[in-house]
Image (cartoon, grey):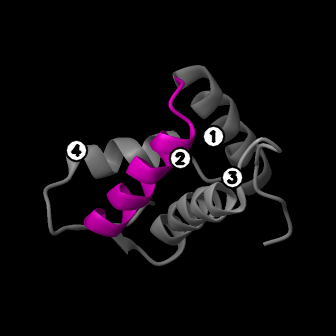
Amino acid sequence: MDYQYPLSADWSTEEIIDAVQFFENVEKAYEQGISREDFMNSYRRFKEIVPGKAEEKNLCDEFEEVSGYSSYRTVKKAKDSEDGNRIKMP
């Protein structure tokens, strides 16, 4: 990993840690797979930090641009999966 995560200067230290965890979980979904439950928990927390769709889209687009990993597609796959499944992105 040779890039920075998209973050907001307005976030607390705890919010930054939780947002980074969400982006790390997107990476895990692509690189090794992650349980749906773990991923959705981190996404729900991310949505508490970033409740607006426009800001979420901007941050996720920025992350995809630097990493090549799509948060949107990962969230969609997780939502479409059944509980107990692992998420593994192609």
Q: What element carries label 2?
A: helix
Which quadrant, please, contains the N terminus?
Answer: bottom right
- Viewer-nearest of discs 3 and 1: 1
Q: Please tell me whether mark 4 or mark 3 is closer to you in this view.
A: 4
Closest to the observer, 24 or 73: 24
Residue occupied by mark 1: 60
Eye-nearest disc, 4 or 1: 1
Left or right: 90 with respect to 77? right
Q: What stretch is highlighted in magenta?
A: 36-52
Q: In this view, does 64 lie above or below 55?
A: below
Position of 79 compared to 8: left or right? Answer: left
- The answer to whether the residue labelled 1 contacts the one labelled 2, judged by CB atoms less than 8 Å apart, is yes
Kindly identify the residue that appears in the image at 76 percent across and 43 percent down: 65
Whether 83 is drawn above or below 50: the answer is below
Q: Name the residue under label 2.
A: 71
Q: Residue 87 carries which label?
A: none
Mark 1 and mark 2: Cα distance apart in space: 6 Å
Percent across and percent down for residue 77 are 33, 48
Question: Around disc 2, counting alpha carbons within 10 Å, would you say few (fewer than 14), some (14 to 19), or many (20 or more)?
Answer: many
CB atoms at circles 4 and 1 under 8 Å apart? no
Q: Disc 4 residue type?
A: Asp
Among all residues in the image, which is located at the extreme bottom? 32
Residue highlighted by disc 4: 80
* Res. 8 image quadrant: top right
User: What's the CA distance linking mark 3 and mark 2?
Assistant: 10 Å
As drawn, 3 above or below 34: above
* Residue occupying image coordinates x 83% and y 59%: 4
Q: Which of 45 and 67 is in front in this view?
A: 45
Residues at marks 4 and 3, CA–CA distance in whole angstroms: 22 Å
* Tag 3 residue: 68
Q: Which amino acid does label 2 sit on?
A: Ser
Q: How far apart are marks 4 and 1 (CA)?
A: 19 Å
